[in-house]
């Protein structure tokens, strides 16, 4: 039997090794002085010293079917950013800053160009959040992944002093709710978008230019998930609660940080919903309530503050705006819009 029998079965070890060597070089550019050793061992090592009473905050997530858009356009340059930023934003809501990140890339056939492009995005995002990409797994699994499909999963670990944890427990009625804009759909709602535009049957519409968007549809849909780590780091000490607006939208994410007897009254007139959401709603004939349950509708993060801290927060982050107020609410419907 020939020496390349494994290659004939669909797994090219040499190609995988070449790809891993390439992406390892990219990952090393994110290393801080807390990374111990190098990539390639059976475990990744990180020095967690420097905290008095540290709490580890971790999160795992994937990019979802946004990858189908990337595949259709053969453009994987941004979805790596999506992965890191989604994960980092989630642990930020606890007050934790990301320390290190690990990735999983699954492919049916090893493609060094795709793997490198994915890594480029992850490296950019890790550097932006001062996070070290210390390891991962690139798996070639023919028969499990079809040629035009890949899987992309990330795992982040952050640290926060126990006394500085943000958990929403101190939120009271009368607290102010501040919004920070998203950069687009981020990484949620793409299965619905694909259905509405019939993308799985004909992806050519991704190259269609829409006047209201000012660009082609595909370009807007691949806009990277925004990171809020650097933006919010200087004001974490005055934040009572944060909700990252991901799957579930503005209806289902904010209650996750509220005490049981409270709700939020959002002022819909306080922001202009971006055109991409309007286009999706019209194209799919979707009810407004469903839009707010599936998409972020232009709001990527909400922050709850005491009224006395509002002016300072807005001075530090002038792009933020007052989006609503915490209210007494003992009903099952805890989110209101006016």
Image (cartoon, rainbow, N blue to C red):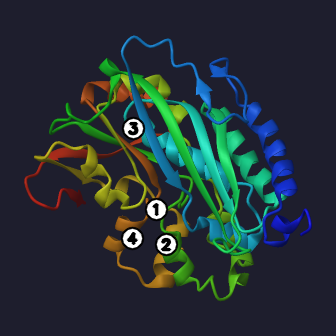
x and y percentages locating residue 229 in the rendered image: 52, 34
Residue 171 x, y percent position in the rendering: 20, 35
Upstream in sequence: badge 1 or badge 3: 3
Of 274 and 206, which appears nearest the observer? 206
Q: Which residue is mark 2?
A: 278
Q: Residue at x 67, y 33 (%)?
A: 127
Q: Relative to 231, is 268 above or below? A: below
* Residue with the most extreme bottom position: 201
Q: CA distance from mark 3 to mark 4?
A: 23 Å
Foreground mark, 4 or 1, reads 4
For the question of whether residue 216 can be seen, the reply is no
Residue 195, compared with residue 211, is above or below; it is below
| Residue 193 coordinates in the image, percent (x, y) | 53, 75
Q: Secondary structure at mark 1?
A: loop
Is 74 displayed left or right of 106 in the figure?
right
Q: In the picture provided, is 27 more to the left or to the right than 314?
A: right
For label 1, the residue is 273
> Which mark is drawn over residue 291?
4
Q: Residues within 10 Å of mark 3 (few under 14, many from 20)?
A: many
């Amino acid at each position: 039997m020939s020496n390349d029998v494994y290659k004939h079965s669909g797994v090219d070890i040499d190609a995988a090794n070449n790809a891993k060597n390439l992406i390892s070089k990219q990952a090393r550019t994110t290393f801080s002085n807390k990374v111990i050793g190098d990539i390639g061992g059976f475990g990744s090592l990180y020095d967690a010293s420097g905290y008095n009473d540290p709490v580890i905050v971790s999160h795992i997530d994937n990019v979802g079917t946004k990858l189908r858009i990337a595949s259709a356009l053969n453009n994987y340059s941004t979805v790596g950013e999506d992965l890191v930023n989604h994960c980092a934003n989630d642990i930020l809501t606890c007050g934790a800053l990301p320390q290190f990140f690990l990735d999983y890339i699954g492919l049916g056939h090893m493609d060094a160009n795709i793997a490198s492009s994915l890594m480029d995005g992850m490296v950019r995002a890790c550097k932006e959040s001062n996070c070290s990409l210390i390891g991962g797994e690139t798996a070639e699994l023919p028969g499990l992944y079809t040629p035009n499909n890949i899987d992309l999963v990330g795992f982040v670990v952050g640290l926060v002093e126990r006394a500085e944890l943000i958990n929403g427990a101190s939120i009271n009625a009368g607290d102010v709710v501040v919004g920070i804009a998203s950069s687009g759909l981020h990484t949620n709602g793409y299965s619905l978008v694909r259905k509405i535009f019939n993308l799985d049957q004909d992806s050519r519409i991704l190259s269609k230019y829409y006047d209201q968007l000012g660009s082609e549809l595909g370009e807007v849909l691949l806009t990277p998930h925004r990171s809020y780590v650097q933006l919010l780091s200087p004001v974490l000490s005055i934040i009572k609660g944060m909700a990252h607006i991901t799957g579930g939208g503005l209806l289902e994410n904010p209650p996750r940080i509220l005490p049981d007897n409270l709700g939020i009254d959002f002022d819909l007139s306080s922001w202009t919903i971006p055109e991409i959401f309007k286009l999706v709603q019209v194209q799919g004939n979707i009810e407004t309530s469903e839009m707010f349950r599936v998409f972020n509708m232009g709001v990527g993060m909400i922050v709850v503050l005491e009224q006395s801290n509002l002016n300072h927060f807005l001075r530090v982050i002038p792009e933020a705006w007052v989006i609503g107020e915490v209210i007494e609410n003992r009903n099952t419907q805890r989110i209101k819009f006016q």
